[in-house]
Every structure is written in C-alpha cells, then in structure tokens.
Image: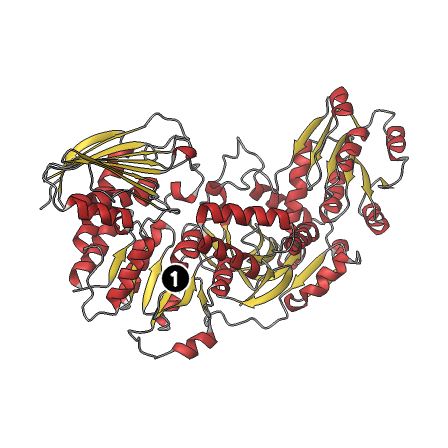
Amino acid sequence: MRQLFLDRGMTVVKEVCKPLLDDHMVLVEVHYSFVSSGTELATIAQTKNNTIFKSVPEKVKKIMMSLASKGAQETSRMIKSQIKGEFQSLGYSCSGVVIAVGKKVKRIKTNDWVACAGAGYAHHADIVTVPENLVVRINNKKYVREASITTLGAIALQGMRRAELQIGEFVCVLGLGLIGQLTVQLAKQAGCIVIGIDLIKERLDLAKQLGADFVYDGVDEEIQREVLYLTNHQGVDATLITATSDSDAIVQQSIEITRKKGKVVIVGDVGLNLKRNPLYSKEIDMLISCSYGPGRYDVEYEQHGKDYPYGYVRWTENRNMKTFVQLVEQKKVLIEPLIGKEVTLDEINKGYEAIISKKSIGVLLNYEGEKKSKTVDCSKKSIESYLFKPAKKDNIRVGVVGAGGFAKDMLMPAIEKMKGVNLSAVVDANTSRALTVSRLYGMENRFVNQSDMLQNNLVDAVVIASSHKYHCAQALEALKKGKAVFLEKPMVTDEVQLELLTEVLKKQKNVPFCVDYNRGFSPFIQKIKHALKKRNSPLMINYRMNAGFIPKEHWVQTDIGAGRLIGEACHVFDLFYDLTQSQPTAVSVDSMLIGQESIFPTDNFVATISFEDGSVCSLHYTALGHEKAGKERIEIFFDSKTIVVKDYKELIGYGMPYGFNTSLRYPDKGHNALLKEFFYQLTQEKFVPPIPLSRLEDVAKMTLLIDKLACDGGGSQVVNNK
C-alpha cells in the first residue's frame, strides 16, 4: 500500500506494509483525505529549514556537547542521522470504509463508513489504523467525501465551545483559512453576528458567501474603528484566532477589538508576546483551544479506548467529531466551497502548490478511482533476493523488531560493526520510524509485523527491542521458526508468559537465546568478578538506581511497559545472581504506597535479597532524586575491602591491589560485549548461552515476585529454590 511521507523537506509516496490492527484500533480503507493547509505546509517549511546546514552555531554547540558527554562514535551517528534525515507521516483527517476492527472495539463494525482523525493515525495513505475514539460513523455514505475534513471541523468546533458563545453575540474570526471558514459557519449556526478578518480577498469573499455578516482586510487601519461602530462602541464578545503567524500583532489586534471582560480564544499557532494593556484594563480572558477537544493527547482515552463520563465531560473529541459529521449531513456546514482542488495521492505536489500559490484554500485527496496496491507482499524485491538461501555462519542475517531509540542508538550501531553479521530487516508498527532506520542502516526489508519477516526466510537471528508486553510472544514466535533470539529486557512481564517461554527453552537443547542483561559484561564488573573469585566472606552489596521521574502517561508505566521494576530493575537482580554465584533464600521489599498518583511503588522501593552463601544484596530504586547525583552507584563490601562503581565510568577499590582503580571517559554497561558474545556463539557448533538459561528463569521469577511485593506496599518471602 502507499503512504505519503515528508523526507528532508520533500514529499514522497512510499510502498509500505498494511498497518497493524491493535485491540482498540479500527482498520480503514481510505477513500478521501483532506490536506490541512496550515499544519502540513508549516511542517514542510520547518523540515526544510532544519537541515544540518541551518543554524550552524546552534548545531556546532550541540555537536560539542555530544562529543563531551557521549563520545565521537555516538556523535558521528547523530550527525549521520541528521544528514540522512527522518521520514515523517503527513495527514490527520480522512474518511473511508472499515475493513477490520480490534477485538475490544465496541462502537464501530466492519463495513461502516467512517471519518477518522489523529496525527500519527489518519495519514494520507491507502489504509490506516486509527483508535476507536478517533473514529466516528458516517450515517449517509454519500457524505464520505465531505466528512474527510472532520478533524479540522472538530478543531473549529472546540474553539467555539471554549468561547461559550450565545445567540446574538458578536464574534470575530481572525484568519479565514480552512478552520476559520468552518468557524464562520459554526458561529452563524450558533446564532451569532460574525465578523471575518483576513489578508486575502478571495478568503474574505468566501467567508461572506458562507455566512459572515461583515468582513475586513487585515491591513485596514480602520478595523478597530469599524468593529467598535458595529458593536455600539463595546467591542466583540469573543475573538477566535484561527490564523497561523509568528507575529504578536494578531493577538494584540484581537485584544483591541474585544469588549471588556470578553474572550480571546487561540485556535491557531500565533505569537504570544502580550502587552499588559489593554489586556489588563479590559480583564480579557485569554483561552487556548486544545485541538479536537477533551481526550486529545490522553493516552488512556485515545489509545486504550477509555471514554470520559458523559455527565461530566459533555464534549469530548469524539463527540465533537460526531456533531460535526451530523452538521455536514444536515447541510448546515458546507464543505464543497472549501475544496479548491481534488488530486490523487500521486499528484499530491500539485495540491500543495495550489495551496502555496493561494489558488486553493483546501485540497482533497481522492483514492476511490485508483488501483489499490497489494498489501500482502511488503518487500517483494527483498524477498526475491533472499528467498530459500540457507543461513551461513559467516553471514548472520539479523532482523530487528522495534526501532525505538535504544535499538537505533545502541543495539544497531553495535551490530553494524560486527564482521559476518548483517542488519537485514527492521520491524516496527510506526512506518515512518521503520523507513528512517532502514535507510540509516542500509536495510532493504521493513515490516510492521514480525510474522511477515519470519515467513519469508529473511533472517537467521532476531533482536527484539519492542514494547515490553510483546517480548515473550515475539520471542516464542521467532524460536519456533528456528531463529536465534536476542531479547532486550525484560524476558517476561507476567507468570503466564514465564511459564510459556521457559517450557520452550527447556524442551530445546542448546537453544540460541539470550536476554540483554548486560551489566555483568561491563569491563568494571568483569574486573570485579575476577577480584571476587578468591573472597572469603559473603558479599554486602548496595546498588542505588537514581532513575529519574517518568509520568504515568508514559508507555513504560502502562500495561504495555509493565512498570519500571519489571522493565529495568531486572538488570540489577541479574547482576546480584552473577556476582554472588549463589541462590537466593529470602527477599524483603519496602515500597512507597502513599496514594499519590505521581509516586509509583514500582518506581520507589528497596529490595533486599539474601543468598545461600550469606550474601545480602539491596537495590535502592527511586524516581525522586536529582539527575546530577548520578544514576547508578554500586557499593560492594567483603573481606575488609570496598569497591565502588559510579555510573560505570569510575571504578574505585579500597584495600584493592595497585592498578585496580579505573576510569572511563564514557560509561560502558556491557551492551557491546554481550552482543559480541551472543553472535560469536551463533558461529560455534554448540551454542553456549552468554547467560545460563537457568539464571534467566530465576531472575524472571525474582523480578515478578519483587514487583508483586512492591505493588502490595512491601513484604517478605522465603524463596524455594527447588
């Protein structure tokens, strides 16, 4: 299927895979999408100006800071990424027919005609997948064309709601682009006296045609005088700013023409450098209108389908969308006059040119008459080139599942440098991210679904760095296809996953599987383990993780991320097993469970593990500290000796031999060493896991147990090692 992207300031149409259908999502075959002239052109202009050669002093400063903190290699990757650029999806308003729904979708069904909204979802593409709360049904199919503008209509409607307009009030709409023209019509339907202001004569004429009672050229010096005359020298009751400009003059003008104790609602993107007067003397209410309405940018509402109670939040973004579609179907809002040009997806540049030249206020993309691209074959050329070729020990083909920051900036650069190991394919539900990463690392194959990659025999090993909830299922699928698996932590997120995965690992002898518990492979820990070989006493270890705050909306804190204890603290538990070389006998947990939403028990806890050899290891994990205190600090006490590790950059030994102390310019937590060992083992006749599989199982069990105790507010438990 085809999708429109922005690539270094240029629009390009790419063949991509059909998007994934999640539980709360709706899969829609697009028939029409509407170009948001303001937002999309601003995005294109910003991308053109954001090249590596623009703002040179700022870029140099950024490069120097990166060199100081991250080193030459990381900085080189950053510059390479900047030069090659990132793909960005374009479009956020479309309409079409539903071809599939997620299992938790309740209000929409297959074959419904719908309008869709949302940046990141309702793209300019043949097929889109959109959350249920950003989809509304079109009752009459013949309005599917006009309903493609519903997103912009909801934005205009939300601006109206923020103004709380009443019948007979004077309303000024400042900026008569698409949203401004829609606002004019909505204000007229609300029984208001509407004044329109813009710089372009054709837009003024159109606003007059669509119901504006009075229109004025924005450069007319007599506007304020005229408005005062119209309103009996009071000023308008409300001004809605629907313009886009960096100038502060627009806001100032809106304040000048608004009555005392009136309202100014900012819908567009304008300069906000306000003067105290007359804002102060008039006691003007300055209001911001947030996109489509309540629910926008709320992960629980948009992505997880949780609606707000009707009695408490009357107008959500979904209800605004529904109302707008109804107004279109009732012909109370006219869309046809706003469509200046209609083009196909392949003719999109003609549409943008029409907007830039001011020949069109709105551009409609029509997909109905075009031959749809095949959606099953995601990478025909790549499949033909690799199909049926056997895996070679000196040419390990790697597929990376999940192209987020950790995979892109840590795992892939390390793999790229290895001889005999080739990055062959990338899988990510975000097509823009998959395109960007595939170009950055020269991977010809890209997918939105791991299954498509596996069934075409494109890889020998799979590196999984997706969201935590999906790790287990993706690892099982890859293992069952005979692929080696390197799994970014955590291994599992619940007991059911643990049982399923360990059952498979126990059945297969020498299974090529590893979890990215890298701390034990860092040079400092390797040096410490060598020193501990001759110890006589147990170990007393205190590990402090000053993790930093992550809000509850972040995916890590949701079911998908499973929380930071499971997602990150597991690293440390593995390290305890590794350093003690012993089995636990008991665990004790204390956590903050105080009922304050911003403080999570799995972000702020102390876990103490007692081992059979007498060692006691504690992890102090907190999100309450200051970043300048450093993130990770280890203190190890034994045999009248003390070892301290500071952020894996500094190793200090007290009572240790001369030459033990070491410092590094940049932290080394062992990522590269572990990956290198994993891929080396794949070339051997017998795969020896870099981390014993039995230890992986033990660490997973311990992590889940500590997570449960932390969520309960703390507790202790004896550990049965049988």
- The quadrant where residue 94 appears: bottom right
Q: Residue furthest front?
A: 658
What is the count of numbered marks?
A: 1
Inspect the image, locate mark 1, and give the three-letter code of the amino acid beneath it.
Val
Residue that appears at 90% across and 35% down: 222
Q: Secondary structure at mark 1?
A: strand
Q: Residue furthest top?
A: 281
Q: Is residue 334 or residue 179 the one in the foreground?
A: 179
Give percent across and percent down for residue 108: 50, 52
Left or right, residue 322 beside residue 221: left
Left or right, residue 582 beside residue 667: left
Up the image or down, 462 lies above or below 137; here it is: below
Give percent across and percent down for residue 328: 68, 50
Give percent across and percent down for residue 409: 43, 54
Q: Is residue 128 or residue 421 the one in the foreground?
A: 421
The reply to whether residue 366 is in sight is yes
Residue that appears at 39% across and 40% down: 557
Give percent across and percent down for residue 685: 19, 71
Residue that appears at 80% across and 58% down: 359
- The quadrant where residue 4 appears: bottom right
Residue that appears at 38% across and 33% down: 623
Up the image or down, 596 lies above or below 694; here it is: above
Give the residue number, with chain letter if any, for mark 1: 400
